[in-house]
Image (cartoon, rainbow, N blue to C red):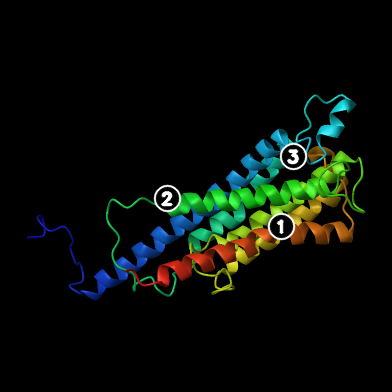
Amino acid sequence: TKQAAKMILADDNFATIVEAVREGRAIFDNIRKFLRYLLSSNMGEVLTVFLGVVGAGVIGLGDLGGGGEALVLPLLATQILWINLITDSGPALAMGVDPETDDVMARPPRRSTERAIDARMWWGVMWVGLVMALATLLTIDLFLPGGLIEGRFSTHDIANARTAGFTVLVFAQLFNCFNARSETTSAFHQLFANRWLWAAVAVSVLLQVAVVHVGPLNTAFGTVALSIDQWAVCVAMGSVVLWLSELRKWVLRTRDARPSA
């Protein structure tokens, strides 16, 4: 009877079950994408601040402490707040409408006890967060004297170095939103399938340009204008997370495709 059944077909059509499974899997996938993106982005922010404080002397931040600041942070609280509220929100929400993957119905059923965040995802979150943090801190180091890397961008201007690191972290998270769409599939697969994601990324880029170059926003967020060369360095450093994640995905695909003994 209908009262005893676990599933009721209102239209007496078994194809409804197939569509329900397809829709359920797509929703579950998008929840995982959302979590993968936000967790890895937040991990990048946490590790940036933590490693920046611990390794301040290594990347040149320690040399600036004599100017009255007992502790020179790699990023300001307002900049982290900007990333969380403005930059991250759009791409994260756009992942909720990401189209289903090609293999959505080819996968075996998952156990009802399977967690949305499994061990592989946690390792991926840690990996991406660490790459983001290192890219951000190396950029700050590049813009400050007395660190690991010195070049033509090296000055004692902490605002300039923070702005560069801030921008790298923003772009790293924007590149990561394409990477976070799958655990193992390349970010370039169905790259343009989600127009809302691209729109969110475009808006985030424009807002980041504004916070770097608009005077009142400079004052509010402790930023300064960057030159074209500096922007190029920031975008290139931010893209590192995408290329290293592609390498990790290739390793995972190769390992998963290897026949078990």
Residue 200 appears in the figure:
no
Q: Nearer the viewer, residue 102 or 221?
A: 102
- Of callouts 1 and 2, which one flags the residue occurring earlier in the amino acid sequence? 2
- 118 to the left or right of 191: left
As helix, strand or loop, the secondary structure at mark 2 comes to helix
The alpha-carbon separation of the residues under discs 1 and 3 comes to 16 Å
Report if residue 73 is visible in the image: yes
Could you tell me how many numbered marks the image carries?
Answer: 3
Q: Which residue in the protein does label 3 denote?
A: 75
User: Residue at the location (90% across, 57% down)?
Assistant: 227
Left or right: where 15 falls relative to 51: left
Secondary structure under badge 3?
loop
Vertical position of residue 144 compared to residue 238: above or below:
above
Relative horizontal placement of residue 79, taking residue 131 as reference (left or right): right
Closer to us: 66 or 32? 66
The residue at which mark 1 appears reads as 238
In the rendered structure, which disc, 1 or 3, sits on the residue that comes first in sequence?
3
Query: What residue sits right under mark 2 in the picture?
Result: 119
| Rendered location of residue 40, percent (x, y) | 56, 50
Amino acid, disc 1: Gly
Amino acid type of the residue that numbered disc 3 sits on in the rendered structure: Leu
- Quadrant of the rendering where the N terminus is positioned: bottom left
Quarter of image, res 2: bottom left
Above or below residue 230? Residue 254 is below
Q: Compared with residue 256, is residue 70 higher up or lower down, i.e. above or below? A: above
Residue 124 position within the rendered picture, expressed as x and y whole percent measured from the top left: 52, 54
Judged from the image, the secondary structure of the residue bearing numbered disc 1 is helix
Residue placed furthest toward the left:
1
In the figure, residue 80 lies in which quadrant? top right
Identify the residue at image location x=58%, y=44%: 43
Relative to 245, 113 lies left or right:
left
